[in-house]
Image: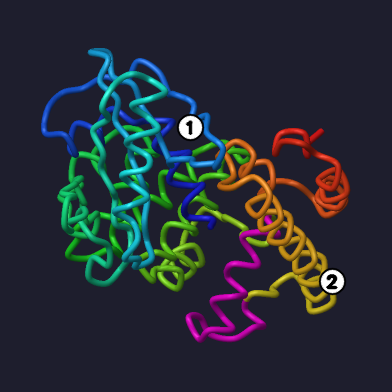
Amino acid sequence: MHYDTTIKELLLGRPDLILRLLLGEPVSVSRVLTTELPKVENLRPDLLLELVDDRIVHLELQAQPTRLLGHRMLGYRQRIRETYQRIPIQIVLWLGKGPVGIPEGIEEPGLLFSYRVVNLQQMDTTELLESPFLEDNLLGMLGKLADHRPVVARLLRRIAETPPPKRQSWLAKLVILSGLRGLVPAVKEEIESMPVEIDIMENEWLAEIFHQGEEKGLVKGLEQGMAKGLTQGLTQGLVQGRTEAARWMLSKQLEKRFGAIPMELALRIESADLQTLQRWSLRLMDARTAAETFD
């Protein structure tokens, strides 16, 4: 999912502050550990971070309800311990909008196992929002807020101040995360009211997100999302639709053969054009590992 890759990227960019909020103590990350855990089955946690005091923090992201998470977390714990010779601190971040839909462990005959589940929508993220770093600010948007609208407006103002190449990347992250809180219409309205132009149509991927929102009734009028002309919009939509279909198919094929996709490979898939995706799909047929699929 887009949100999964985006949040991992933000956490990798600025992990210290949110870890301090989650752990309740000052911490500093010394390195990001590989999530390739050697076993016959391909078991890959979302994020493994090593602190300066040698402790390992395992962060798992979950936005969909599942009753089977406990056994998966236990499997991660065992593999991490075998690989790094340390017992990890395990935290699951619940990113969904509704009630927490995941267990906090396993309690059954002969087995008692637990980990922390943090409901991000009930978390005080004031420090993240006040941070000078956009990575922290975007994660803070997912926390407990009385009114998301001013936060969205402030984030857009900050994004508008960044250089154009980075501006589109930050805007993409904002749109993805706003989808977790049903804020895509608010983002679009704020963009349209800004004195500094941020053209979502410059990014095909962003344009598609807004068009999807229009189809679901989240924004008004398909014509508003096609301000550069009907012909251009239809052509762009056709190309983007084929590209997204190719991304989805390649991701599913990789997951079926090799298990969960590493974040760095998922990011490459998200940024690839249609021709590149088609080339990788052909390479996948002969690849012995997920990495061999890519140029």
Image position, residue 205 (x, y; %): 66, 59
Q: Is 76 one of the magenta-colored residues?
A: no
- Residue at screen point 33% across, 58% down: 95
**Farthest-out residue, left:** 24
| Quadrant (top left/top right/bottom left/bottom right) for the C terminus | top right
x and y percent of residue 188 in the render?
49, 68
Q: How many marks?
A: 2
**Residue under the image location 78 percent in, 39 percent down:** 293
Q: Work out whether 264 lies above or below 192.
A: above
Q: Where 159 falls versus 147 (above or below)?
A: above
161 or 264, which is in the foreground? 264
Q: Amino acid at mark 2?
A: Thr
Location of residue 203 (image quadrant): bottom right
25 and 196: which is toward the camera: 25
Q: Which residue is mark 1?
A: 35
Q: Would you say 154 lies left or right of 212 here?
A: left
Q: Decide which of 141, 198 is in the foreground and name it.
A: 141
Region rendered in magenta: 203-224
Q: Is residue 213 magenta?
A: yes
Mark number for residue 235? 2
